[in-house]
Image: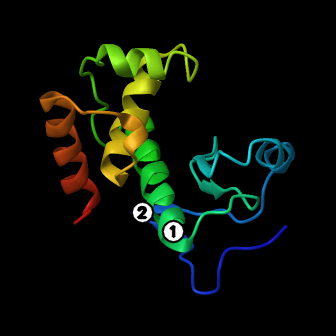
Amino acid sequence: MPGLSKGFPTGVYGIGVRETLYPGEEDYFKTNPHVAGMAADDDKIIMNPYSKLKDNERQAVMMNEAARVHMRNKLIEPPNYDLTPEQTTAFKEYSQDPNDIRQTIAARILSGDPSALQPTPAQTQYVDKLRQFMGVK
């Protein structure tokens, strides 16, 4: 399995990046190359070694996943805003847990991922707090 690029950080925004994948993670990534990375169950960020992202894109994914860990562990109050009808439709297969979807959307807005769709004012307000909490400029 290829490692991270030379000089790539081993942690971002207070969350560690784990290079060694646990059993099942590599198989998952191999069959899902569209999944660039994730916040693993051990609260580490893992990146898909089969992803074709450039380093700056990988950095955005790491920011996204670090935000997920902070929200999941309630280091910052998780979001409780409403989803737009478009977001509800787009994320209906993502998770059955609306809190998981809210956190995903917040993290994607933070990292500039357009798949979060058009944010509402409440979503933007939450992400501004998240940005300040994480020290994202």
The picture places residue 105, in percent across and down from the top left corner, at 38, 34
Quadrant of the image occupied by residue 7: bottom right
Screen quadrant of the N terminus: bottom right
Label number found at residue 14: 2
User: Dot 2, crowdedness within 10 Å: few (<14), some or many (≥20)?
Assistant: few
Residue drawn where x is 49% and y is 16% of the image: 97
Q: In the figure, is residue 5 to the left or right of 49? A: left
Q: Quick check: 93 left or right of 71?
A: right
Q: Please report the residue visible at 37 percent of the width from the left and 36 percent of the height from the top.
A: 116
* Mark 1 Cα-neighbour bin, 10 Å: few <14, some 14–19, many ≥20: some
Q: Nearer the viewer, residue 105 or 136?
A: 105
Q: Nearer the viewer, residue 81 or 121?
A: 121
Using the image as rendered, state which of residue 124 and residue 9 is in the foreground.
Answer: 124
Residue 75 in sight? no
Local secondary structure at mark 1: strand
Mark 2 and mark 1: span between their CA atoms?
6 Å
Query: Percent from the top left, x then y, of residue 102?
Result: 37, 27
Instruction: Give the quarter of the figure containing the C terminus.
Output: bottom left
Give above or below for 2 relative to 41: below
How did the renderer colour the structure? rainbow
Q: What's under tag 2, amino acid-wise?
A: Gly
Residue 128 is situated, as x and y percent measured from the top left of the image, at 17, 47
The reply to whether callout 2 and callout 1 are in contact (CB within 8 Å) is yes
Tell which residue pokes out farthest to the bottom in this image: 7
Q: Check disc 2 and report its element: helix, strand or loop.
A: loop
Please indicate, yes or no, whether residue 91 appears anywhere in the rendered image: yes
- Residue drawn at x 80%, y 72% as measured from the top left: 2
Residue type beneath disc 1? Gly
Q: In the image, which disc is placed on residue 11?
A: 1
Which residue is painted at 30% across and 19% down in the image? 83
Residue nearer the viewer, 34 or 94: 34
- Side of 31 where 13 appears, left or right: left
